[in-house]
Every structure is written in C-alpha cells, then in structure tokens.
Amino acid sequence: MPESGLAEQPTGTALEGRILVIDDEEDIRESLEALLTLEGYAVDLAPNGGEGLRKLESREYDLVLLDLMMPDRSGMDVLRDIRERDRELPVFMVTAFGSIDAAVEALKCGANDFIQKPWKNEQLLVEISQVIAKRRLETENTQLKRALKQRYSFPNIVGRSDRMQRILDLVTQVAASRSTIMITGETGTGKELIAKAIHANSQRAEQMFIAVNSGSLPPELLESTLFGHVKGSFTGAIASRKGYFEIANKGTIFFDEVGTIGVETQAKLLRVIQEREFMPLGSAEVVRVDVRILAATNADLKKLVEDGRFREDLYYRLNVINIALPALRERKEDIPLLVEHFFNRYCQEDEKWLDGNGRSVLRFEPEAMQILIDHNWPGNVRELENVVQRAVVLASRPTVAANALPEDLLRAGGVRIRRDDESGGLPPDASLFEIVAEYERRIIIERLETCNWSQTEAAEGLHVPLSTLNQKIKRLNIEVRRKGDLGKADKAPAG
C-alpha cells in the first residue's frame, strides 16, 4: 500500500471523524488506515513525531493514535507537545511494549487511553467511536453555549446599523480561530472593545488578556515588558522578570497602535508569531508560548511599509484578517442608542436620575439630539461618551436642552445660543435652528405677557400641555416674572 499519509489529501470521507496516525512502522500505519477507512473515518498518516505535529498545525482532528517508541522523538514527548497546543484532543498511545509504568506515565501526560499491540480490531473501533462521540457531544454543547454567548456578549459595543452588525457578525466568526487579527479605525472608534470581544468569545476567554500600548514605551522598555529579562541583563535589572508573552501564555495579547513599534522589536515579534518562541533579554534559553496576537492601528501601515518603518513580512503576518471600524459620522443612526447606553452607564455610576428599574431617565431634547446627530464627531464614540457624561454631571432636570451642550460642539455646528447675560437680536448669519428658537421664544413671551405671566393660561392659549410649555420656558432660558411685575426689562435669552 502506498505511503498515502504523506499526501496532501487524506483517505476516507470523514463522515465518522478524522484521525491522525503517528507511527514509524509502515505496516502499522497501513493496517490502521485500512481498518479505519472501512469504518468511514478520514485518515492522515505521519511516519514520525515531527511530521505528526506539522499535520496537527494544518488541520483539525477528532483523535490521534500515537506510537510510544519512535526514532526521532518518543511518543511521550510528542504527547506533551500536543497537550501544550490542545488539552482536549483525544490521544491514544499505542505500543508493543506494554507496561504498567508506561501506561501510568502516558495517562499522567494527558493520554486518553493506552493501546497495546497487537490490538483487537473490534475493541479498538468501539473505544475510538465512544471517545469521538463523547468529544463531539462536548464540542456541540460548547459551540451552543458559545453561540448564545456570542449573541449576547457585546454589552459595551452598541450599534444597530448595518455596518456595526456586519462587524459583530465578523467578530463572532473569527473569535474561535487562532488567526492574528488587525483592527483598523480612527481614534475613539472602539478598537480595544472589539479586541476584548474577540478574546471573550474565544476558547482563550478564561486566560489572560493583556493590552499593550506600543507607543507609550521606549524600545528597550517595550522589549523587556514583552519578553522579560534575567537579572543583570541591563542596568537596573536587579531581578529576573517574566514578560507579557510568558504571562499571557494560552491567552491573548492586544497591541494598540502597533505601527509605533520599533524595527528591532518588530523582528522579535515576527519570530514569536512564526515560531511561537522567544528569548528573554540576557538569556540564552528559549521560551515557548501559545499566545494569540491581536493588533490595532489608526495609521496607514502600508505607507509605513513603503517608507521602511514597518516590516512587510510582519504586516502580512498581522493582517491575516482585517476588521475595519467605521467612524461615528458613518453610522449616525447609532447615535441615539449610544446616548441611551452612556446615560445608563453614568447615571448608574453616580446613582442619580434613575427610575425604579435602575435605568436612566435623562434624555436630550429633540433639538439637542439633532445637534448631536448633525455633529461630525472627529473624536468618534469616545467624544460622544464625554458629552453624555458631562450632561449627567451637570443635569438639573430630566431633559437636557441644547444650551447645555458644550460650547465647542455648538460652535462646530454653527449654533449660538444666547445666555442670560446676553441681549440683542440674532446675527445676520444665524442658523435655522437659532431663528426658529428665537421666534418661538418671542411668541411664548408675548403670550405670557398677555396672560399676566400665568403659565397655565398661556399653555391653554397656545394649545399645548402645561408641562410642554414649562420645558420650553426652561430650554429657551425665559425669565418667568411674577404676575403684575411688568416693570422689569425683558432680558430672557433664547436657547
């Protein structure tokens, strides 16, 4: 029988599962291939431990049959490597030299079973079938839980727009993979939130998530922070220290503004991605790690590559999957939802303006909300969050008027709202909003004066609820006078 295990395409249809056989004896490989293929399994073959590990890197398997005694590396060493990469993959150790000590050691190292040559075909097939069925059931349960978790696990990522829904769908798709991911977008679009969502929905969710702001550390300190160092490796290294890669083993490291990393550190980062190993500063020993890398940038990395400031090979290693976040001005339909989200967050933090269910009762008036929607938001979601937080701190009533918005935001939209100490008409270049507000203010003042400043009568005359009139009086900064107090000048500003 030909050595089919070295071919790219495995035999079998994989209806029952995919099995990898690692054994240095050709007769054993061919025998197991024939037996398992007839049972409906897809079978890959590897003549040694190194080839077996390479196949495990390239595709998923339901079970591994691993020979204990091989010339290049012992099956026990290969088993330890497999368990470093995957703790759940079923592994059966196979040997012609059965002993209690060997079986105990194999089970301690993570083997699921210990099979002695020659095996009984029926018994072996039953044990394989049971283990694969159990693993599939566990996998289906895990995937179901993860699907439910993914559906509802984006509490800090708010958006109903088509663009954001497509991004959340993409996050759900890529979270379970091992691929490196590049997240791009302007400052304040939420790149770190997306990175955390990917980690939270991955198989590494229970492990460390470490965020590294690449641009905030000088090159020497960044290398020590990432890779660690041994005592005496540089001035001030009074003790050995583990780096983030070692600390985050089995977890995720997120590089924020990855384009700011120096060229020398880029080379070491590339080695970690390719070889999954590194040497701490001052050490000659190699440390192996399994860390998923996520990166983010608001810079044009292709331009940095052209300028020689970023390695092209590292760029392609990092940019396996790209998630491009839209600016807030490109998804303005999400602004009301984001406002509600931030109102709830900061009202709950400050324990004020909450209803009986712990939800915020604060709202922007329609004119104020329109200003928010029309704004260009150069600082994106982060800028909007600051505006809402400010409104929570300064709010004196449940409805936040336009004149309560920051002056720079109003000026950016061409809106000028007169304050209490200002007087006179509107400027010639007044906006439509200002003109309407000023006209509304004058009508209300005239009606109040006609009714001797009785707000109830004025509301009836204007055919609006009293509560609506009161809100407009406050929003437009109309100074309400006592009845009969006609001698005071009307100095009420418009809003």
Image (cartoon, rainbow, N blue to C red):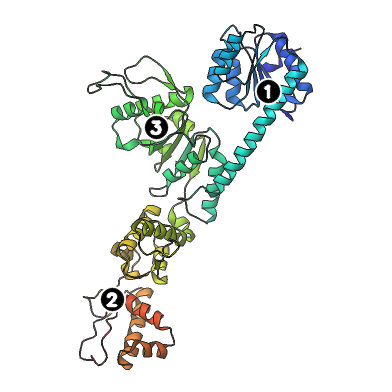
Whether residue 10 can be seen here: no
- Considering only vertical position in the picture, is 287 above or below 217? above
Residue 300, by quadrant, is: top left
Q: Which residue is mark 1?
A: 19
Q: Nearer the viewer, residue 439 or 106?
A: 106
Q: CA distance from mark 3 to mark 2?
A: 52 Å
Q: Which residue is mark 2?
A: 427
Residue 310, which numbered label?
Answer: 3
Whole-percent x and y of residue 194? 46, 44
Q: Element type at marker 3?
A: loop
Mark 3 / mark 2, whichever is N-terminal: 3
Q: Nearer the viewer, residue 339 or 188?
A: 339
Q: Nearer the viewer, mark 2 or mark 1?
A: 1
The crowd level at tag 1 (other Cα within 10 Å; few <14, some 14-19, many 20+) is many
Residue sitting at 75 percent across and 28 percent down? Answer: 13
Q: CA distance from mark 1 to mark 3?
A: 41 Å
Q: The N terminus lies in which quarter of the figure?
A: top right
- Considering only vertical position in the picture, is 205 above or below 59? below
Q: Amino acid at mark 2?
A: Pro
Q: Element type at marker 2?
A: loop
